[in-house]
Amino acid sequence: MASMRIIKVNNLIKQLLAEIMERELSLKIGVFITIAKVDTSPDLRYTRMFVSVFPEQESHYVSETLKKELPKIQKHLYRKLHMKPLPKISFEIDTTAQEADKVEKILKEIF
């Protein structure tokens, strides 16, 4: 279980990243991303951000765009975060929805 401090840091980083990505990240028309989860390490040095992508087939495009834009996103985040140490951000595509769909299809086939 994460400490209350880590939970607060995760919520703050999620909020700030959402604002930064809305303003600074330009994606193709019709591609949407949502921050599904933010997970910061207990020592506050690393933060993994899980994003869900719509439509799902654009996941690779979004992943490449986030890798390319990561230094700019991180710079904007560091300007707004007033804490030490500043966490290094990494992005991962959240596949929870796709996995849930697979399980649901399997269950429908069984019943």
Image (spheres, helix red, strand yellow):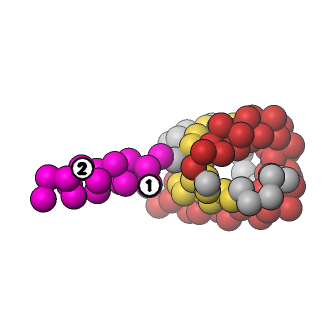
| Crowd band around label 1 with a 10 angstrom C-alpha radius: few (<14), some (14–19), many (20+) | few
In terms of depth relative to the viewer, which is nearer, 46 or 72? Answer: 72
Predominant secondary structure, magenta span: helix
Residue 110 location (% of width, % of height) = 14, 52
Residue 6 location (% of width, % of height) = 52, 54
Residue denoted by label 2 = 106
In terms of depth relative to the viewer, which is nearer, 34 or 38? Answer: 34
User: Which residues make up the magenta segment?
Assistant: 95-111
Check the image and report above or below for 28 versus 61: below
Q: Measuring 35% from the left and 54% from the top, which residue is drawn there? A: 100
Residue 17 location (% of width, % of height) = 72, 57
Q: Measuring 68% from the left and 64% from the top, which residue is drawn there? A: 15
- Tell me the element at label 2: helix
Report which quarter residue 93 is drawn in. Answer: top right
Q: Measuring 73% from the left and 35% from the top, which residue is drawn there? A: 64
Q: Horizontally, is 109 left or right of 54 in the view?
A: left
Q: Earlier in the sequence, mark 1 or mark 2?
A: 1
Check the image and report above or below for 45 versus 96: above
